[in-house]
Image (cartoon, grey):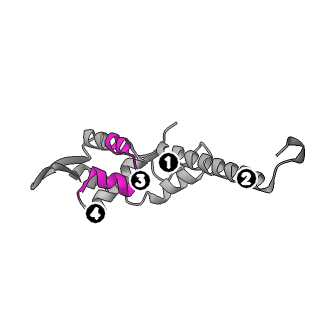
Amino acid sequence: MSGKQGKSTDDKQWERLQETDYLFCKMVRRFVKERDRVSVEGIALPGMLILQKIIRDGEQRLGDLAEQLDFTSGAITALSDKLEAGGYTVCRCKENDRRKVLKGITEKEREMVERTATLGNDVLRCCSRGSRKRSLSSKAVSMNG
């Protein structure tokens, strides 16, 4: 096709599709960036998701948690290490297969969950607002940055 004839309908549709994909990915990255800035009592929101999943479903393998929460293996390992260092989780080997390490929570985590049980709406509000200033009903939820 020569430059004088202009773009075909297929070319225009392809450009719109590429632009739509670019804008969608940009929006998702911004949301994830905002989500990762939220912390509850010093634990980042992705860490809280891990803890809540363990509380709800019991001890789990890191690989299973990563798959269910759509985290990379690197992300789940880093978050898991932080949670364990903070005293919120504990690793233990499965009795019949020592290669399988299960992640469970500690009493410290159970107490924190009880203290912060009603903060879900505050966290959602933090993630959905565009403003950098956040006023929350509890000081347990904060925005980093």
Estimate the spatial distance between the alpha carbons at disc 2 and disc 4, rounded to whole Å: 43 Å
Asked whether disc 2 touches disc 3, contact meaning CB atoms under 8 Å apart, the reply is: no
Q: Residues within 10 Å of mark 2 (few under 14, many from 20)?
A: few
Q: Earlier in the sequence, mark 3 or mark 4?
A: 4
Residue at (52% x, 47% y) in the render: 32
- Which residue lies under the disc numbered 2? 16
Which of the two labelled residues, at mark 1 and mark 4, occupies the earlier sequence position? 1
| 2 and 4 marks in contact (CB < 8 Å) | no
Seen at 60% across and 42% down, the residue is 132
Between 77 and 108, the one nearer to me in the picture: 77
Verify whether residue 73 appears in magenta: yes
Measured as percent of width and height from the top left, residue 55 is found at 28, 59
Q: Amino acid type of disc 2?
A: Arg
Instruction: In the displayed orientation, state which residue is furthest to the bottom.
Output: 57
Give the residues drawn in magenta, as a range. 59-79
- Please report whichever mark, 2 or 3, sits nearer to the chain's N-terminal start: 2
User: Disc 4 marks which residue?
Assistant: 57
Upstream in sequence: badge 2 or badge 1: 2
Q: Name the residue tied to disc 3.
A: 70
* Residue type beneath disc 1: Arg
> How far apart are labels 3 and 1 at the CA level?
14 Å
Q: Are marks 3 and 4 in contact (CB under 8 Å)?
A: no
Residue at point 76%, 51% (across, down)? 11
